[in-house]
Amino acid sequence: MHEVLRKVVHLLIGLSIAIAIPLVDMQLVLMAFVLAIFAGFILSDAISKGYKLPLISRVVLLLEREDVLPGKGTLYFAIGVFFVLVFFPLQVVIPAIICLAVLDGVATLVGIHYGHHRIWKSKSLEGTLAGIGTTIVALLVLTPLSIPMAAAAAITAGVVELLSPVDDNLTIPLSVCIVLSLLLL
């Protein structure tokens, strides 16, 4: 149940960010991400040193995996999104954030409940395919991408989520932005 709640929150917050970014001045968006990352590191350090912060400690305990830096997933998500916001145009950043939110969340949720065929480490064929399929649909509904572009973005995110040697919150947005940028040339 713990992982299900984590991924539902990941999905909802990621989609909210993807929808909100185009509606806000880019300078404010970038400042908000820098502030969130800076505050996140301070809070993470305090919690890892044993400080009990009202509400924040409970949320981190509820949503973070055991035996990792407190808030690591959230920090990596913010860093990954911040990086692509700085280096890529919004027309590829928004789909990349949607890929990160939807694919990662759906693949895990389906994999936990219906994943029977393990294809790489703890990842399942069912979770990966469901993540890719759902992400294609989300991209077609939420962005102006064509079917081939949405499929390329979702498949890229699926492969990266499956095989990335580092946290996929960092690698999915970057990989999707690179692929979409190359396809738009």
Image (spheres, rainbow, N blue to C red):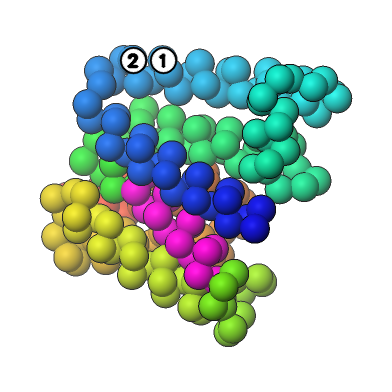
Residue located at (25% from left, 18% from top): 25
Dot 2 and dot 1 residues touching (CB under 8 Å): yes
Work out how far the residue at label 2 is from the one at label 1, CA to CA, in angstroms: 5 Å
Q: Nearer the viewer, residue 36 or 51?
A: 51
As drawn, 116 above or below 154: below
Q: Find residue 116 and report its horizontal and vertical position in percent.
A: 59, 83
Residue located at (61% from left, 80% from top): 118
Look at the image and tell me in which quarter the N terminus lies. bottom right
Describe the element under mark 2 as helix, strand or loop.
helix
The three-letter code of the residue at mark 1 reads: Met
The three-letter code of the residue at mark 2 reads: Leu
* Residue marked by disc 1: 31
Range of magenta residues: 97-111
Residue located at (60% from left, 41% from top): 73
Residue 72 seen from this side: yes
Is residue 117 in the magenta section? no
Is residue 107 in the magenta section? yes
* Residue marked by disc 2: 28
Q: Find residue 87 and report its horizontal and vertical position in percent.
A: 35, 32
